[in-house]
Amino acid sequence: MRKECWKEGYSEVLSPQMLSARIFEKSGHIAHYEADMFLWDHEGQRVGLKPMSCPCHCVMFNRGGAVSYKSLPIRLSEFGVVHRNECRGSLSGLRRVVRFCQDDAHIFCMVSQIKQEIANVLDMISTIYGWLGMDFALNLSTKPESALGDAAVWETAEGMIAEALDEYQAKSGRGWSLNPGDGAFYGPKIDIHVYDALKRPFQCATVQLDFVQPQRFDLKYMTSGAAAAAAEAPKDGEEESAAGALPPGYERPVMIHRAVLGSVERMIAILTEHFAGKWPFFLSPRQAVVVPVSAAFNEYAEEVRNQLHAAGFYCDVDASNRTLNKMVREAQLSQYNFILVVGKEEAAEAAVNVRTRDNEVHGKKTVEALLADFKQLLADHK
């Protein structure tokens, strides 16, 4: 995910976990989400653990000084830890927890950039889920009863997302459906339901359009006509614009919330069942194990393991010195992607004898050739 975010031009940031409650009052989360937040008084100030990162990213937007239209879109991503005060009865393993990590990101852009940015996010989702071997469906969730903001703004936002989905359908052939009244309180959203190997649906990824937060946090950027507008602006003593209005030559950015994996813990639970424990090599926590045929080759087995580890691969050594068949069988049951048997011949040739957890025998390979194969598997997300 980090590599894909880097390729797509995101800047990775890190926001605090504990914040003043004022930021969530400003964002509207206290009014609509207070029962699901952890809040308490600390030294005369009300503070809380963040349930999401979007208000923090809004604060970051204007902290670097005036933002020019030439800088947009600005894409901020964060693998942020969040806390939500879930009811005890709703908690379930890794699928629903109180503290979790979310691959949260926010895109600040001009209205004219909305459709392209949504298309980019949908392409990213398609790529990631393609690697995972999971199909998905798109749903447009519209204005809920608890919505903030003007009805006209909501109608505009929903229309823009529908247009983006139509264009994506024309390009990819993937249709979408309507989910009335299930949008976020600050804007409509695209909910992405993924399907595992058993065709069970899970709501993980999301794309949300937000005109409300930029207004509440007074986010703005300079337009191409900012200099001319500033020259025509009222001078000291002259009539000023209404409170909350933008200065001449400035516009509000639109904020796009996006998550691809959603809760990382929940995604791990889904993928564990989806792969039935047989993780693909590029995600596997047990990529390889070296099995020496006898104790005499334990030292060479450690050398091979160290070479693979230095190259960035997960590798163990089974130095239990049991029978070879028993060690190989146990490695297969433990779902190691590759079992590397080493003995006298392999040690003499700086090689290993390769087989898979499905008992497919690849035969003898040099460690150098094996590393090349492993690197290709990573590059191909296999």
Image (cartoon, rainbow, N blue to C red):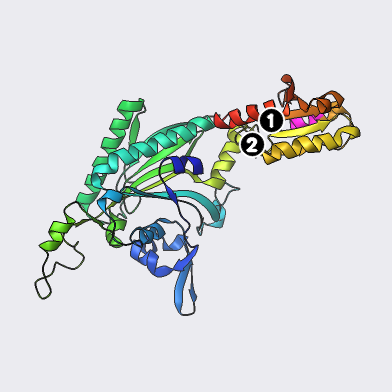
Residue occupied by mark 2? 284
Visible in this render: residue 204? no
**Which quadrant holds the C terminus?**
top right
Label 1 – label 2 distance at C-alpha: 8 Å
Residue 332 highlighted magenta (yes or no)? yes
Residue 182 point in image, percent of width and height: 35, 46
Q: Is residue 223 above or below residue 138?
A: below
Q: Is residue 200 left or right of residue 280?
A: left
Visible in this render: residue 324? yes
What amino acid is labelled 2 in the image? Ser
- Kindly check if marks 1 and 2 are in contact, taking CB atoms under 8 A apart as contact: yes
Residue at 18%, 57% (x, y): give it. 226
Residue occupied by mark 1? 337
Q: Is residue 310 left or right of residue 48?
A: right
Please tell me the numbered disc located at residue 328. Answer: none
Q: Which residues are magenta?
A: 328-336
Q: Is residue 214 above or below residue 207?
A: below
Q: Secondary structure at mark 1?
A: loop
What amino acid is labelled 1 in the image? Asn
Q: Nearer the viewer, residue 97 or 13?
A: 13
Quarter occupied by residue 205: top left
- Label 1 neighbour load within 10 Å: few <14, some 14-19, many 20+: many
Residue at 52%, 29% (x, y): give it. 133
Q: Secondary structure at mark 2?
A: loop
